[in-house]
Image (tube, grey):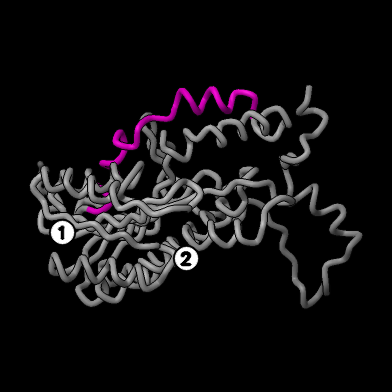
Amino acid sequence: MADRLKGRNAVVTGGGRGIGKAVALALAEEGANVVVCDIGGAVDGSGVDKTPADEVVEECKKLGVKAIAQCGDVSKFADAEAAVKACVDNFGRIDIVCNIAGIDRPKMIWNMSEEEWDQVVAVHLKGTFNFIRNAAPLMREQRYGRIINTVSEAFTGGPSHLNYAAAKGGIATLTYGAARELGRYGVTCNAICPRAWTRMTADDKVIEGIKKRIAAGLMPADQLDRMMNELADPSYFAAFVAYLASDEAANVNGQIFFVSGTELGHWTQPVVENKVTRDWKKEGPWRFDELVKLVPEKLLVGYVNPAPPQPEEKK
């Protein structure tokens, strides 16, 4: 065990399995005490099982740190409050929050129910807010804190689970904003965008769905092959989260990082690439006839419609 996080106390949501488990152990390996917060449900959010969290707690303790399990529903504000309180009551304070917990209920938008939308957004987006909101006042007061959220490449708009993608997009915006609000108090807020082999990516239904979307032309033909070749166990990149939680990353704030077993990357924040300016006081409102010319010639230079593919793309 190293000591780069010795004396620090962390809450890790979704800490019983997959990425959350790898992160909890990576923090413990660096000396952090850990609250393993996991309800132990299935990929679709159903069910409760305390066993995964309890098992990770025992693994953390073997690394020489303190650890406790918290079987809470991240989508419930009171459960998030209880997890943060448990960290403070058992370890003395809270220094690190890792929002990893997630579920997936993939459907095309025309088949998605209101319940499927609400449940996924509640776990991912509201769950992330719940833990930041409950930890932020304590971190602000002590003028120290590390918040690490989880987004996904889906936030760029991948097909088949827009509830998940939209929630991840919301978390990206939440990360940017929270970093700006909390940064002056010594609290950083960053996010990882992981690519890993987990229950969610290894699920037979997910793989079958990818095959169907490849056949329909919604995903590249080599999507599944690339996924199988690139997806590694999350333990291969979990140390990056420990790095973001450390003093070494004190000046890293409001950033999103791509992480996998083979690559590390940095997502840039959205920027305006092209623009047309005018003196609105002299020229008045934009006119339809000028927009017909300006949009394709000035704003959408090099633009290619992603859906449906244009004829030249099919050749």
Location of the C terminus (image quadrant): top right
Q: CA distance from mark 2 to mark 1?
A: 25 Å
Range covered by the magenta-colored residues: 220-245
Residue ID at (83%, 72%):
285
Q: Amino acid at mark 2?
A: Lys
**Residue 8: image tag:** 1
Nearest the viewer among 55 and 216 is 55
Tag 1 or tag 2, which sits nearer the N-term?
A: 1
Residue on which disc 2 sits? 126
> Secondary structure of the magenta portion, mostly?
helix
Q: Position of residue 58 (x, y in %)?
A: 16, 46
Q: Nearer the viewer, residue 4 or 168?
A: 168
- Quadrant of the image occupied by residue 114: bottom right
What residue is at 44 percent from the left and 47 percent from the top?
A: 42
Residue 314 sits above or below residue 20 on the image: above
For disc 1, the neighbor class at 10 Å (few under 14, some 14 to 19, many from 20) is: many
x, y (%) of residue 110?
74, 51
Q: Residue at x 43, y 61 (%)?
A: 175
- Who is closer to the viewer here, 299 or 283? 299
User: What kind of residue is marked 1?
Assistant: Arg
Asked if residue 128 lies left or right of residue 82, the reply is right
> Residue 301 magenta-drawn?
no
